Amino acid sequence: MYGQVLSLMGIVSRTSGRLGEGKARTVLRHPSPHSAGGVLGALFVLGKPRVSLLLFITAFTVFVYASLTRGRGLSTGDLLVFVIAGMLAPMGANSVNNYLDRDIDPLMERTKRRPLASGLLKPWVALVFGFSLLAFSGLLYAAWFGPLPAVLAIAGGLYYIFVYTVLLKRRTPWSTVVGGIAGSFPPLVGWAAATNSIGVTGLLLALVIFFWNPPHFWALAMHLRRDYERAGLPMMPIVAGARVSFAYMVLFTALTIATMVAVALVEGSVIVAGGALAAAILMSRAMYVIWKRVEEGALGAFKLSNPALGLFFLSLVTEALV
């Protein structure tokens, strides 16, 4: 069983460092709509697989850690069901997000080739597909792990769809903070699936994501400032300016590091403390890059934040296995 976990985590670790880099390959961004394979490819891209994978990593690592340290243990069935459900939930929510943003995606260079923006799929297909994935994920969680992770997974998806995308994204620069709560649900799902509870550590891990999210996406918004301006989205770097945004980014980065350290203290883990230290070094480096180069360094800072988060969550699995 440990071999299966290590194999999965090897794939995750090689991927996490690349999640924020570059654009998706052309074959994924431009699937042909004239074949079954092309439709499946478009549906896959619709779910924002790189973003979904990052959310899945946070849920999966917490699930493995809690399962191995809280007495549940792991089976092949546990791993398989969690991998499927853990990817379907964020991909479903992201698909509906694409449906709701289909009017502004064509205005942005980063998003104009998405399946709906480029006309590869009909809007209703994205809507049905997205809610179907989210519902099926909830059913899998409920049938295998119980109602609590199912409720949390669906709640996280609905929060992202209705609170972030519908209510906040186009109205306030604080949407990344308040709406970012949606990204805090996956660690709670992982902990609940393993323990049928949330717990102090589960909440702290959710807070890690909550504090990490704003500087991560504000760095991207700095780099793609013109894109967001064309789309009329009030991102913090546009509304408040780069320097004010940088001050907020430093604050949230410090809170992220402090919460990581709190997890290590609560769990009494030297390995997790090492993961927090490694993450702190990368995130501090990201802030330094922005401080020295402001908008010119924002993309580099954005790329550093993904592996920083990945290292911390991978330290949980390392602690559990060791």
Image (tube, helix red, strand yellow):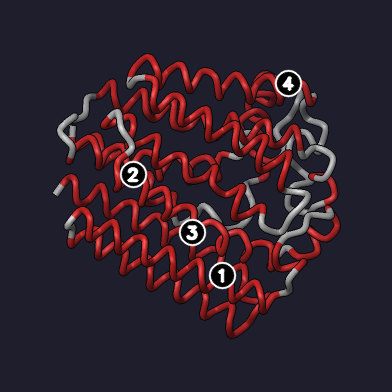
Residue furthest toward the bottom?
Answer: 292
Give how far apart the Cα atoms at labels 2 and 1 are. Answer: 24 Å
Q: Is residue 51 left or right of residue 296?
A: left
Q: Choose between 99 and 245: the one closer to the eye.
A: 245
How far apart, in angstroms, are the residues tagged by discs 3 and 2?
15 Å
- For the residue marked with disc 1, what is the amino acid? Met
Please tell me whether residue 140 is drawn above or below residue 165 in the rendered image: above
> How far apart in space, not on screen, are marks 3 and 1 (Cα)?
9 Å
Give amino acid for label 4: Val
Quadrant hosting residue 230: bottom right
Element at badge 2? helix
Helix, strand or loop for disc 3: helix
Q: Which mark is residue 100?
A: none
Nearer-the-camera pick, 175 or 58: 175
| Nearer the observer, 134 or 226 | 134
Identify the amino acid type marked 3.
Phe
Residue designated by label 4: 125
Where residue 68 sits: x, y (%)? 18, 38
x%, y% of residue 75?
Answer: 22, 25
Q: Residue 259, how many percent across, how many down?
A: 36, 61
Nearer-N-terminus badge (3/1): 3
Residue matched to label 1 = 249
Q: Nearer the viewer, mark 4 or mark 2?
A: 2
Mark 4 lies on a secondary structure that is helix
Pointer 3: what residue?
Answer: 211
Q: Sequence-wise, which precedes: disc 3 or disc 2?
A: 2
Q: What separation in Å lies between label 4 and label 2 (alpha carbons)? A: 35 Å
**Dot 4 surroundings within 10 Å: few (below 14), some, or many (20 or more)?**
some
| Residue that carries the numbered disc 2 in the rendered image | 202
> Badge 2, how many Cα within 10 Å: few under 14, some, many 20+?
many
